[in-house]
Image (cartoon, rainbow, N blue to C red):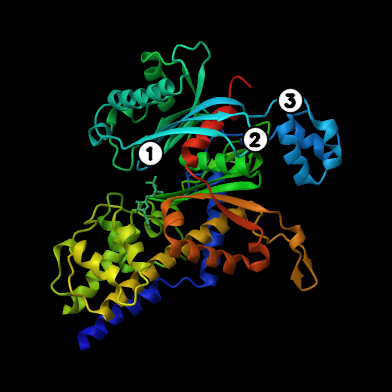
Amino acid sequence: RRKWKRVVGVLKELEESCETTVGRLRQVVDAMAVEMHAGLASEGGSKLKMLLTFVDNLPSGFPILGQYSMIVGVPPVCYFGMVFEFLSCCNLAALSVSCSCILPWSEKGTFYGLDLGGTNFRVLRVELGGQRSSFDRDVAQQAIPPRLMTGRSEDLFDFIASSLQHLVEKGNDSEQSPIIKELGFTFSFPVKQTSVSSGILIKWTKGFAITDMVGKEVAGVLQQTLARKGLNMQVAVLVNNTVGTLALGHYHDADTVAAVIIGTGTNACYWERTDAIIKCQGLLTTSGGMVVNMEWGNFWSSHMPRTSYDIELDAESPNPNDQGFEKMISGMYLGDIVRRVILRMSQESDVFGPVFSSLSVPFALGYASMTPLMAAMHEDDSPELTKVARILKDDLKIPDLPLKARKLVVKVCDVVARRAARLAAAGIVGILKKIGRDGSGCIRVGRTRSDTKMRRTVVAIEGSLYTQYTMFREYLHEALHEILGEDIAQHVILKVTEDGSGTGAALLAASHSSKS
Ligand code: ADP
């Protein structure tokens, strides 16, 4: 009985040390905004790298000239199908007849995307030219053979180019066609970008280790391989996966200002004014802005609630003192935090049976696979927690755990997921604060804020933690509302984009096309 009390004590202590009151979250918001400023002020000025992407315009699906001339009342020149949609959303139907003619969409034609860096590798072709939000897509996806992840760069890039070649052939798009095909390359590893279509690999992550690639210009290596294979294809953009997500989000909804991915790892990017990027004096773009890749997985603030489990996880990870935010939020780690707490419980009481080896090995089930199990246990709504019992028995080798202990395990999942989701929400509000979209600049009318002054703000979001883990998503939304307050939160929309990292890259190839 005394031992059971100790197990309950472990849970209590966890709950206390994972506390994320709204006051604490607001401190994390402030810290995120401060670090963003610091990372933009000087190279190495913050744990946030705030990398320049050179992406200075985002695909819109709208004829850009048309949009602006419409606002000043001059009939725009554009393709007719879109005009009606645009006019109806502006309540300017009366002008519609005079507006239907000539300029092409800002994005039109066939473009290719290549996405390397997630769980799977994808190649895709996107046909643009119809109505916004309805484009045709053909996708091929496969896992990278492990031997290619640690071999020679030539073998990996040959494999990638062959997949592209296959896609081109499948689409009846002749390889020998004299028209150069443009490609958006999503390469989700740390890259020092030198232009929108070139960058140098700083280091590999996520199990890749091809030493002859480090320090090389990534797009150039791909370009040479494509040429060797006889593919008439040009790498038009080289981007990070969050940038692809932002591009796709913006294509569908022009109010999209930032993108967040919470999957195996986590990262975010957003649209920044070039004059705020102080570390790059004299940076000029026609749009006056540029997408900044935050690399927010490495964010850290002393206001984040850290437990002994986090400290141990960090010490036993392959990258200690690195990616602190990511280690509290993403799929690669959440399940392992839960494993560590259950291990501690089993050391305190024999109700869990002997300490099993499957529990005592860090990342025992592989880096990421414990998180889906955690989600499944968390969301087990059967009265007897039968799914929890099955996962504990089959995957963690803890058979016959009594119901009261199973309830405790569910509670552990809840505490860890809730803290992660609330911190992610604070991160998102931090970005909004930095760009003045958190409502803090709103004019107050009487005692309440005037919501007419808050602009609609969309954040594109992707990753299995958000899309597959319902409790995580709900906790994230709840925290967003708590931090911002209802009247501001109603203007902030999180929109899921599907496969943005690849599709968005193809769209960016279109909006940065050398042909336009
Ligand atoms: P990527 O590897 O490209 O980030 P995802 O966004 O699909 O791909 O994220 C995969 C990660 O999400 C896995 O590492 C896993 O830990 C986690 N995950 C997958 N499915 C679920 C789920 N149903 N609930 C919670 N986490 C999940």
Q: Nearer the viewer, mark 1 or mark 3?
A: 3
Q: Nearer the viewer, mark 2 or mark 1?
A: 2
- Which residue position holds label 3? 103
For the residue pair 133 and 367, the one nearer the viewer reads as 133
> Is mark 1 in CB contact (under 8 Å) with mark 3?
no
- Which residue position holds label 1? 117
The residue furthest bottom is 1
Give the amino acid type for the residue marked by disc 3 in the picture: Leu
Tell me the element at label 3.
Answer: loop
Q: Residue at x 36, y 62 (%)?
A: 375
What crowding class fits label 3: few (fewer than 14 Cα within 10 Å), some (14-19), or many (20 or more)?
some
For the residue pair 368 and 400, the one nearer the viewer reads as 400
N-term mark: 2 or 1? 1
- Which residue position holds label 2? 131
Q: Does the Cβ of the disc 1 residue fall within 8 Å of ligand 1? A: yes
As measured in the structure, the alpha-carbon distance from the residue carrying label 2 to the one carrying label 1 is 30 Å
